[in-house]
C-alpha cells in the first residue's frame, strides 16, 4: 500500500473534492437536515456507514460479477439496486435489533437510498481503482478508505452548515432570504472557500 496514495485520497475526499461542496452530490439532505446540529450529525453518521459499506459491496460486485461476465455497461443500474437493497436491509435490521437507535436513525435511513453521494462514490471507486477492467493492487482497501473519507467530508460540510444555520436563528434576517435562500448563499460561500484547497500539491 502506498502512503502517498492514502494521503492523496484523504485530502482529495475531505477537502479538495468534498462530496457536497465541490462535487455537489447529496445536496437534498444537505439543505433539508442541516437546520440543527444533532440531526445533521445523525444523518452524517448514517451516510458514512452506508457509503463505506456500499463501497465494499459495489467493488465486489464489479470485480467478481460485472467484469468477468462483461456486464460493465450495467454498472449504474446494478449499483443503484445494490445500494437501495442494502439501505432497506439496514433499516429493517436496525428496527429489529435496536428500536431506540431506529428512532434516531430511522427517519434518515430512507433518505440515504436517494442520496446520489452514495452512488457517486461507488462509481468513483470503480473509475479510480480499476484500469482496463482490472483492479489495481490494493484497490479494495483504497475503495474502503475512500468511502470513509468521503463520509468524513460529508460530515464536515453538514456540521459546518448546521452550526452556521443554528447561529442564524439568533439574528435578524430579512424575510426574503430566510431559511432556504440564505442556506443557498451560505453553501455558495462555503463552496468558494473550499476552492482554496485546490492549491494543495502532493
Image (cartoon, helix red, strand yellow):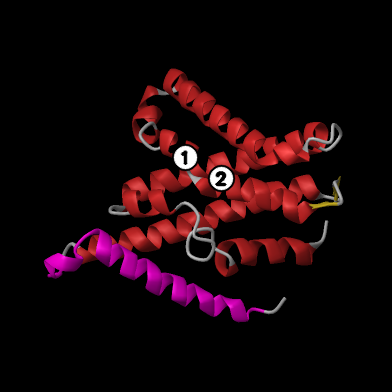
Q: Is residue 122 above or below residue 7?
A: above
> Tags 1 and 2 in contact by the CB under 8 Å rule?
yes
Residue 201 left/right relative to 47: right
Q: Which range of residues does the magenta coloring cover?
A: 171-200
Q: Say which residue appears at 63% left-offset and 36% top-offset.
A: 77
Quadrant of the image containing the N terminus: bottom right
Q: Residues within 10 Å of mark 1 (few under 14, many from 20)?
A: many
Residue 80 left/right relative to 21: right
Query: Which residue is under mark 2?
Result: 118
Q: Is residue 42 above or below residue 85?
A: below
Residue 148 left/right relative to 62: left
Q: Is residue 42 above or below residue 93?
A: below
Total numbered labels: 2
Q: Disc 1 to disc 2, how far (Cα)?
A: 8 Å
Q: Say which residue appears at 26% left-offset and 64% top-offset.
A: 181
Q: Which mark is residue 112?
A: 1
Q: Is residue 176 magenta?
A: yes
Amino acid at each position: 500500500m502506498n502512503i502517498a496514495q492514502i494521503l492523496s485520497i484523504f485530502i482529495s475526499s475531505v477537502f479538495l473534492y468534498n462530496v457536497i461542496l465541490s462535487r455537489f452530490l447529496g445536496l437534498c439532505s444537505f439543505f433539508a437536515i442541516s437546520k440543527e446540529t444533532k440531526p445533521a450529525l445523525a444523518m452524517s453518521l448514517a451516510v458514512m456507514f452506508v457509503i463505506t459499506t456500499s463501497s465494499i459491496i459495489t467493488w465486489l460486485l464489479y470485480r467478481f460479477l460485472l467484469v468477468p461476465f462483461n456486464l460493465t455497461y450495467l454498472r449504474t443500474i446494478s449499483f443503484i439496486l445494490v445500494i437501495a437493497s442494502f439501505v432497506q436491509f439496514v433499516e429493517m435490521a436496525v428496527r429489529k435489533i435496536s428500536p431506540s437507535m431506529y428512532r434516531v436513525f430511522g427517519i434518515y435511513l430512507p433518505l440515504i437510498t436517494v442520496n446520489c453521494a452514495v452512488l457517486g462514490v461507488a462509481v468513483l471507486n470503480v473509475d479510480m481503482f480499476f484500469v482496463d477492467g482490472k483492479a489495481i493492487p490494493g484497490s479494495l482497501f483504497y475503495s474502503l478508505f475512500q468511502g470513509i473519507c468521503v463520509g468524513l467530508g460529508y460530515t464536515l460540510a453538514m456540521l459546518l452548515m448546521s452550526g452556521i444555520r443554528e447561529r442564524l436563528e439568533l439574528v435578524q434576517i430579512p424575510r426574503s432570504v430566510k431559511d432556504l435562500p440564505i442556506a443557498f448563499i451560505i453553501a455558495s460561500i462555503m463552496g468558494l472557500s473550499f476552492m482554496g484547497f485546490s492549491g494543495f500539491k502532493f
